[in-house]
Image (tube, rainbow, N blue to C red):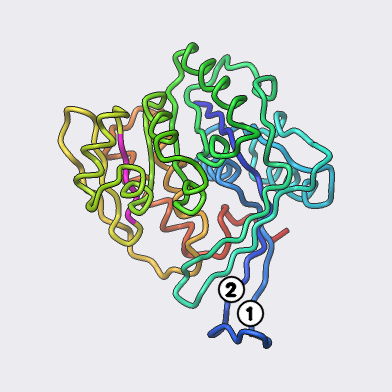
């Protein structure tokens, strides 16, 4: 069975599904549930859901939220032996989801900081590594994660990188983000992120610029599917899978998981992108960013 190492963040998501318009200063009817979250944790969970082995490298608090997340990884069959407990509280995200399923996130990083090289397990047997952009954007984790990347590259293991939200990327200089892309074998931004990182106005221009830095670029386009290209090859367009959207939280993470699991199992970039949009459609049809395990946390 192929094995994927997922490096980055694990969070507790508090999802507030609004039942109407927000009444500022007053009560607003909502449905509230808690779920496992964090980009790296979500990708690992969806990779395991495909039947591919997934291991998570991240940090949580020694608290009830951390215990709940660990328990969920057990159920999802994600290897959490490199999930480090710290004295900081487990990271939490409040996710507001409107009636169209669009999410707005309010994160508190908590324990998701300070990753160091020794947090990473032996690379023997791994076929791919996923890096969450949040891990590199966090100044307390950046050095350690860059050292992990250097070790992964030395081992000849392909690197898949998700740039994560524009709101998070605006906290650092764009040139710094661009400097990380040549380290990666695959970069998987969504459309907004691709336009921001490349400083372009359209998807085609963004692909062209990003391909100068990374040999494989896959741009996630939500209801418009995805566009992908290997350097020197034809551009590939994949339609989205029609579904009733309940919550877009984790859409990009589930896409990345489907893409990675298929790619390392021998699929070409077209089949891998199709697997990504298919898994993403499953994710957005439910509340929460991970595969459902029969209960919420």
Q: Residues within 10 Å of mark 2 (few under 14, many from 20)?
A: many
**Residue 196: in sight, yes or no?**
yes
> Which label belongs to residue 265?
none
Q: Residue at x 59, y 73 (%)?
A: 17
Q: Is residue 82 above or below residue 30?
A: above
Q: Residues within 10 Å of mark 1 (few under 14, many from 20)?
A: some
The residue beneath circle 1 is: 30
Whether label 1 touches label 2, CB < 8 Å: yes
Q: Position of residue 168 (x, y in %)?
A: 51, 49
- Secondary-structure class at tag 1: strand
Stretch in magenta: 217-221
- Secondary-structure class at tag 2: strand
Question: Between 103 and 23, which is closer to the camera in this rendering?
Answer: 23
Q: In the rendered structure, which disc, 1 or 2, sits on the residue that comes first in sequence? A: 2
Left or right, 222 with respect to 136, comes to left
Question: Between 277 and 106, which is closer to the camera in this rendering?
Answer: 106
Q: Residue at x 30, y 29 (%)?
A: 213
**Residue 294: in sight, yes or no?**
no
Q: Position of residue 120 (x, y in %)?
A: 65, 23
Which image quadrant for residue 189?
top left
Q: Residue at x 56, y 65 (%)?
A: 287
Question: Between 263 and 56, which is closer to the camera in this rendering?
Answer: 56
Q: Position of residue 117 (x, y in %)?
A: 65, 21
The residue beneath circle 2 is: 17
Q: Residue at x 50, y 28 (%)?
A: 129
Q: Is residue 79 magenta?
A: no
Question: Between 264 and 198, which is closer to the camera in this rendering?
Answer: 198
């Amino acid at each position: 069975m192929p094995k994927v190492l997922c490096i980055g963040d694990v969070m507790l998501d508090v999802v507030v599904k609004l039942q109407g318009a927000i009444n500022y200063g007053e009560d607003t009817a909502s449905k509230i549930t808690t779920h496992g979250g964090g980009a790296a944790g979500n990708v690992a969970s969806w990779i395991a859901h495909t039947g591919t082995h997934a291991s998570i490298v991240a940090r949580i608090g020694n608290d009830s939220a951390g215990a709940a997340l660990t328990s969920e990884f057990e159920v999802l069959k994600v290897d959490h032996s490199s999930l480090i407990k710290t004295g900081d509280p487990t990271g939490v995200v409040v996710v507001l989801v409107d009636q169209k399923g669009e999410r707005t996130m309010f994160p508190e990083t908590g324990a998701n900081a300070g990753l160091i090289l020794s947090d990473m397990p032996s690379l023997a047997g791994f076929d791919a590594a996923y890096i969450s952009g949040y891990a590199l954007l966090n100044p307390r984790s950046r050095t350690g994660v860059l050292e992990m990347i250097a070790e992964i590259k030395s081992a000849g293991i392909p690197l898949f990188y998700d740039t994560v939200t524009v709101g998070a990327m605006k906290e650092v200089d764009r040139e710094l983000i661009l400097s990380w892309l040549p380290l990666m074998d695959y970069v998987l931004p969504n459309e907004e992120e691709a336009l921001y990182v490349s400083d372009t106005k359209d998807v085609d221009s963004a692909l062209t610029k990003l391909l100068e830095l990374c040999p494989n670029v896959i741009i996630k386009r939500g209801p418009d599917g995805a566009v992908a290209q290997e350097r020197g090859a034809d551009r590939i367009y994949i339609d989205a899978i029609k579904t009733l959207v309940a919550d877009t939280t984790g859409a990009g993470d589930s896409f990345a998981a489907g893409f990675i699991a298929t790619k390392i199992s021998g699929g070409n970039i077209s089949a891998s992108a199709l697997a990504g949009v298919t898994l993403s459609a499953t994710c957005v049809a439910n509340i929460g960013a991970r595969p459902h395990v029969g209960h919420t946390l």
